[in-house]
Amino acid sequence: MHTMTRTRRTLALAALGALALSIWPSPAQADILGSLTDPFRSALEQGSFGMALALIFVAGLATALTPCVYPMIAITVSVFGARETKSRLEGAMLSGAFVMGIAALFTPLGVISALTGSAMGSALGNPIVVSVLALLFLLMAVSMFGAFDMNLPPAIANRLAQVGGKGYRGAFLVGFVSGVIAAPCTGPVITVLLTWVGTTGSVGFGALSLFTYSMGLGVLFFVVGTFAVALPKSGRWLDWIKSVFGVAMIALALYYLKRFWPAQPPPLRNDVWIWGSLAAVLLGVGVGAVHLSFKHTGLVERLRKGLGVALAVGGLLGAVTWVEALPVGAHISWGDDYLAAQTEARERNMPLLVDFGAEWCNACKELDHEAFSDPRVVAEAQRFITVRVDMTENDAASTRLLTQHYRQPGLPLVVVHHANGEEAARVTGVVDADEMLVRLRRAN
């Protein structure tokens, strides 16, 4: 899809894309998974919604199926009186007020995260910040696996549960506080989503994404309150859903830490790599990543659970690596010394192409996939002196001076110069290969 991981690209995106690939009838092309995930990445980077919001809604619905939320649906609906109404319309209106209460809690968080997006993006270039964030995701994953509970103190939870009462005002307030009570399961998902939204810098997308998440979280409350539907009984399947979240969060933690590893294999975009990753995920699920438990079980079952989690996480990371890898040979050879490139362009009377990028910049990666990997763009770039300025750690004095020189506070930023040094064009958002070609051809 944002602005999404991307966006940086999220592991949920990779898992969904991998699942779609596994049932695709003819996976002859090496870029099938990339094609399937294009709408999601585009939505995250550009603020167009569609599939991005659909997946966020599904995340909210999945959160409602966790042990922190699901068992309290019927009770909560009774608290604000939806089951005692005289008509279905009144039940729907009360249930709607409840869902709006949930949205009133979460939507402002998306706005705040988007407003601080540039600061968050810069922070993601700091190894300390990334390490703390990864540790937070790991702790949340361990909680999802049942190692400990992140519950509110009973006294506070009981007091919050008594807020509101009957009527529309009461339903709204109960919805608001229910989001707080359900924090042990909503918190991990919200944290990931806010980190994701923060890298987009789009206030509109931030607000709408958290509102959509709230709708997904509240849809079962609305259905039960409006139609008096009896939900299936709670069971071990609720813990299975928590395990899925736990696997995803471990993969996210390792993904954030990936660029700080001392040695990394080169990204491989071939059928063997993606099918091996898919096989690892399926084998991990089969061994016990989801249906087995670390809690109140024997040593053998715990070992199987651990092995399954490791295989599933490894498979997800492999799928993400495949998604992010560029096709073989479809890339521009970039220099890394701006001053040297500028001097060479002047001495050889050639136009200059400058690309500012960073590991935390989802839009920059999107440009790599959408524009700079296109064979036509690669061919056109041959007449340029090309240089890429790494802004991952943008506190360096040299990079600050460059961004001040171009009067561009954020990323992405691509600047095209004529051979005489004057600026011919610039790109400050995600564009496709056709548009990039138009910008490059302005230089002479």
Image: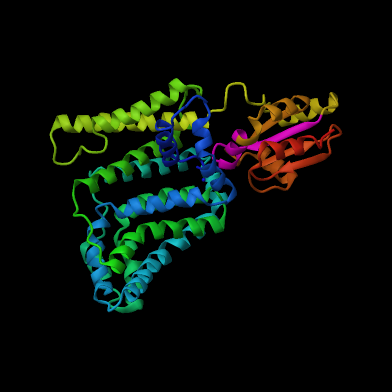
Q: Nearer the viewer, residue 126 or 107?
A: 107
- Position of 62 relative to 344 (above/below): below
Tell me how the rendering is colored: rainbow
Quarter of the rendering occupied by the C terminus = top right
Q: Is residue 358 magenta?
A: yes
202 horizontally vs 433: left or right: left
Relative horizontal placement of residue 443, taking residue 310 as reference (left or right)? right
Q: Position of residue 272 (x, y in %)?
A: 44, 20
Q: Position of residue 440 (x, y in %)?
A: 76, 35
Regarding residue 2, the answer to whether it shows in the image is no
User: Which region is colored magenta?
Assistant: 351-369
Query: Observer-nearest residue: 29 or 329?
Result: 29
Percent from the top left, x then y, of residue 397?
66, 40
Q: Nearer the viewer, residue 59 or 406?
A: 59
Q: Judge whether residue 98 is colored magenta.
A: no
Where is residue 3? Give x, y as percent: 56, 47
- Residue at screen point 38% across, 36% down: 251
Residue at 53% of width from left, 47% of height from top? 199
